[in-house]
Amino acid sequence: MMAFSDILQLSKGQIIIVEKEYYRVMSVEKKAGVAQMTPSVVLKLMRLSQGVVVERRMKVGERVDVLETERMKLQFLYQDAKDYVFMHPENFEQYTLSDTMLGRLAKYIGEGQMVDVEFYEGNPIAVVMPERITIRVESTAEARSRKEGDNTFKPAILENGMEIMVPQFINPGDLIVVDVGMGKYIERLS
């Protein structure tokens, strides 16, 4: 189902249609009009078909189509070329999602992992990317020093093959939290 919304009523995370494309609202910023300029709203939007973030300026009072989506948890099964196959854990229905739809999450996803997917009219249109993900460190270099207050970093290879920089005290086998958007270390769990 689709609803119309005033541009000022939009909030982060909603999915809208602009010029027949699906976009996720990343931010909404109202700009006051100066001199003869009318007030406007600057939207930061992510085009779901390509994962590209764009800025769009719209007039206050304009209306957009807001999609009312259904969210389901799906289990990742396997990757086939550039597509990722997921399964609904209750009815075993399978869905194929493109690497573009997964965006940055594609780097972090592992077999059996549960992911929230948004559906519109029965079709998957977007993956809800978590802000953080927990992942195991596969290997890392030896710590160069163990001085108190040492804030230097070293490279580490995660279980998904991705390399990130981690603090000196991180060892192979440690579970760490990584910021998915930035691809940076946040904290150690074990």
Image (cartoon, rainbow, N blue to C red):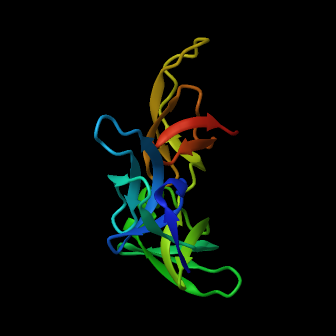
Q: Residue at x 50, y 56 (%)?
A: 108
> Is 73 located above or below residue 144 in the figure?
below
> Is 90 located above or below residue 101 in the figure?
below
Q: Is residue 159 shown left or right of residue 189?
A: left
Q: Residue furthest front?
A: 36
Taking depth in this image into account, of 32 and 35 the one nearest to the observer is 35
Q: Residue at x 49, y 69 (%)?
A: 126
User: Residue 96 location, x and y as percent?
Assistant: 46, 80
Q: Residue furthest left?
A: 36
Q: Residue at x 30, y 35 (%)?
A: 35
- Where, by quadrant of the figure, is residue 107 drawn? bottom left
Q: Is residue 158 shown left or right of residue 21?
A: right
User: Residue 93 location, x and y as percent?
Assistant: 60, 87
User: Residue 116 location, x and y as percent?
Assistant: 60, 67
Question: For the C terminus, which image quadrant?
Answer: top right
Question: For the N terminus, which image quadrant?
Answer: bottom right
> Is 13 located above or below residue 119 in the figure?
above
Taking depth in this image into account, of 62 and 24 the one nearest to the observer is 62
Taking depth in this image into account, of 6 and 56 the one nearest to the observer is 6
User: Residue 30 location, x and y as percent?
Assistant: 45, 43
Taking depth in this image into account, of 124 and 163 the one nearest to the observer is 124
Count up the numbered dots.
Answer: 0
Q: Residue at x 47, y 44 (%)?
A: 157
Q: Residue furthest top?
A: 148
